[in-house]
Amino acid sequence: MASREELIALAKHIADAMPEVTRNEWMRWVQIATRRGLEKAVQHAEQLSNDVTMRSAAKRANQLIAQAIRSHLSKLKKLTPHDQQLALGYVAWHLAIQTLRGSWRESGE
């Protein structure tokens, strides 16, 4: 079992690799990963990133998700299923924080 600090650090590394991904896009991917597993969810994201019918922002988000998870897949696979879910949840929090920071910068505060 990984410590909370280790899970949060891993989540931050993953989130930092996906600066253009919204929390909503991430949560959609997490639902797929929960149902189908990390490998299949990464493959799905890769397929969506190449889908000509997808919006460019959604394609880019799926490309970044696939790259970020693939680069951290070995670490994620070493975690228990419960710790994997915690780490993926912490990624969502980091993405939400990134969005808030971006909106503060845009508003000039």
Image (tube, grey):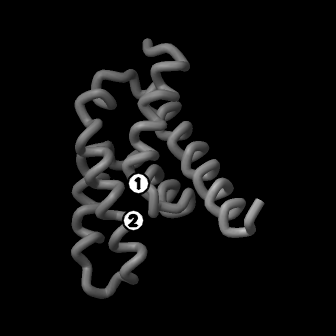
Q: Secondary structure at mark 1?
A: loop
| Picture residue at 29% right of the left edge, 27% below the top | 75
Looking at the picture, which amino acid does disc 2 mark? Ala
Instruction: Name the mark nearer the viewer: 1 or 2.
Output: 1
Crowd class of label 2 (few under 14; some 14 to 19; many from 20; radius 10 Å) = many
Is residue 6 rendered to the left or right of residue 56? right
Q: Nearer the viewer, residue 19 or 86?
A: 19
Q: Secondary structure at mark 2?
A: helix
Give how far across and how far down residue 5 sits, in percent: 53, 19
Q: Is residue 97 above or below residue 89?
A: below
Q: Is residue 34 above or below residue 6?
A: below
Is residue 7 rendered to the left or right of residue 77? right
Contact flag, marks 1 and 2 (Cβ < 8 Å): yes
Q: CA distance from mark 1 to mark 2?
A: 8 Å
Q: Is residue 45 above or below residue 78?
A: below
* Residue found at the very far right of the displayed protein: 109
Is residue 52 rendered to the left or right of residue 27? left
Looking at the picture, which amino acid does disc 1 mark? Met
Which quarter of the figure is the C terminus placed in? bottom right
Give how far across and how far down residue 13 sits, in percent: 41, 37
Crowd class of label 1 (few under 14; some 14 to 19; many from 20; radius 10 Å) = many
What residue is disc 2 on?
61
